[in-house]
Amino acid sequence: MTDHFIEDKTTKVNVNLETIGERVDFNDLKSGGFIKQRQKDLFTVRLRCPGGRMETKKLVEISKIADKYSKKGVVHFSFRQSLEILYVDYKEFRNIVSELEKIGQKVASCGPRVRVPTACGGCEYNPNGLTDTQGMAEMVDQKFFGTPTPHKFKTSFSGCPIDCSRTKEMDFGFQGIVEPVWEDPLCTGCTICSEACKEDAIVSDPDTGKPIFDPKKCIFCGDCIRACPTEAWKAKRYGHIVRIGGKHGRHPMESIEVCTFLPDDKVADAIQKTVEWYNANGKRGERIGNTIKRVGIQKYLDFMEPVFKHGSPVNYLAPGV
Amino acid sequence: MGEVKANAHLDLRGVMCPINFVKAKLKLETLEAGEVLELVLDSGEPIQNVPKSIKEEGHKILEVKKEGEHFRLKIQKG
């Protein structure tokens, strides 16, 4: 019989559980989120937790399952916010997956495909948050999880320029921004905005106290808007800075900014089209940052124009590209 | 802008974030809605953070005056 949980869209890995020890290629199991450990017969089961958010009731149930199947009674919080159940015997895969399915918990994946998105808290409860990062991560996970690509494809969402989700180090990252506008009649010249601005983009006029704004220094964090007592600073528009080609690992690469103020409703299009371009241009085993280096950023931007035109362009000629 | 009369005063010079905000919040809790708290805050981190948090709690900042290295704020309880 076949177990669907270690089957993915590219390489169908059919495993007969009765004889799993002889027939299964343990490397293929990684595509289903089962990672071989040093210890004989034992695997790490990586769960699918987009944005690292989980309902408490589910967490309680998962902890019961983890307690039952982990031979050592331990879990690990992965670097990409997913919970991993350690020391699981491969002979119990079917049981643990069916128990997880009953509580609506899916298993993650590894290998050359779109990975589970990571995200910070976002605008729902974080005072700095400008975008609904959690909602975005959930949406991307639903739409794109497991889509095959030439190499791994990591996405993340940060809600503000502090960039806790490290969008600069992702294959494709989205960081929330807000464009401030100032209305003179509402301003009392209190100078709080120039104090609140950490980028020196706002200085106060020595006579009137009113702001002198330098948009070139602004990183669109919205501190001026939040600090202004009279709503003289307002949000003109929200969106995402889009970054591509970042990675960490043995040879880290910094991403390139390819679009600013991309609206929420174009994020899915941006991912879909970027994955399409990556699959058409990337070599097997090549991260998208290296594909862009080899093929040229302009080719990518030309391809993405129908999507990125909904945002604003950036000076994408970053150092080293 | 006319001078607003304060019902309570709090000097938070030398008090670090976020203790300064917590103290302001506790003081505001002793006031009735519509009453005014006068607050003195250091420049730098306190003036960057405390007014934002006060706004988020639903209070209104009526007046801000810079006095050298600190700020004098009048806050109306929301």
Image (spheres, grey):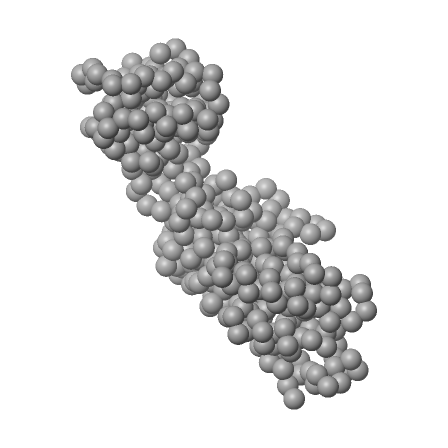
Q: Position of residue A296 (x, y in %)?
A: 57, 55
Residue situated furthest bottom in the rendering: A1
Q: For the point 25% across and 17% down, which residue is it?
A: B6
Q: Position of residue A268 (x, y in %)?
A: 43, 62
Along the horizontal axis of the image, is A126 left or right of A99?
left
Of residues A169 and A87, the one drawn nearer to the viewer in this rendering: A87
Is residue A213 in sight in this rendering? no
Q: Nearer the viewer, residue B36 or A315?
A: B36
Q: Is residue B43 visible?
A: yes
Please identify the quarter of the rendering in which residue A96 is found.
Answer: bottom right
Q: Is residue B46 above or below residue A293?
A: above
All told, the count of numbered labels is 0
Q: Which residue is depicted at the point 72% across and 74% down?
A: A90
| Residue at the (21%, 16%) spot, across then down | B5
Residue closest to the eye, B12 or A115 = B12
Residue B41, quarter of picture: top left
Name the spot of residue A280 as percent of width and height, x first.
56, 69
